[in-house]
Image (cartoon, grey):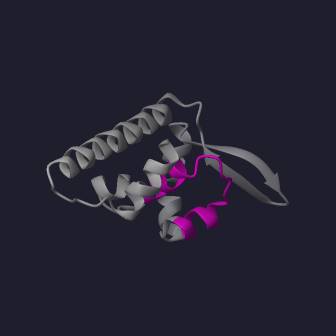
Amino acid sequence: MFTEIFGDSPQVKVLDLLITQDDMEYTKKEIAECADVGRSTLYTFWDTLERYNIVKKTRRIGNTWLYKINSDSLAVKALQEFQLRIVDIIVEEETKNKGHGESHLLSESEMKLAAIVD
């Protein structure tokens, strides 16, 4: 959802992944792969995500840390609320448009996000 609104910068891609999959734990390598950003690119802004408590370490496996979105962070809560509100608006507009005979189909990611909200 964030990538559709704000573009596909690496930071937006990572936020989109972590907020959409808020129950998942990832290594930095997995975050880079799943968000389709280079690992070296991820490292350029990773410290910022930690500094603002966007991500948190969850556990360690061997020498590797796992991370997930920090759902306790006020910034993350605001981003999650924003995402949910955008979905509500999109669904409301789609419902209204269908009532007027218009058919604007939700994108695949909007439908996935709407399913998560329900």
Answer with left or right where residue 118 lies relative to residue 95: right
The residue drawn where x is 71% and y is 54% is 66
Count of numbered circles in the view = 0
Answer with left or right where residue 93 lies relative to residue 24: left
Q: Where 47 falls versus 70 (above or below)?
A: below
Residue 57, percent from left and from top: 69, 45
Residue 63, percent from left and from top: 81, 60
Start and end of the magenta stretch?
A: 13-34
81 or 74, nearer to the observer: 81
Q: Where 15 falls versus 92 (above or below)?
A: below
48 or 83, nearer to the observer: 83
Quarter of the image for residue 30 reads bottom right
- Magenta stretch, main secondary structure, is helix
Residue 27 is a magenta residue? yes
The residue drawn where x is 59% and y is 39% is 70
109 or 36, nearer to the observer: 109
55 or 97, nearer to the observer: 97
The residue drawn where x is 56% and y is 43% is 50
Residue 54, percent from left and from top: 53, 41
Q: Where 68 falls versus 77 (above or below)?
A: below
Residue 67 is a magenta residue? no
Q: Where 57 falls versus 16 (above or below)?
A: above
Determine the residue located farthest toward the right in the rendered image.
Answer: 62
Answer with left or right where residue 95 lies relative to residue 30: left
Residue 29, percent from left and from top: 63, 67
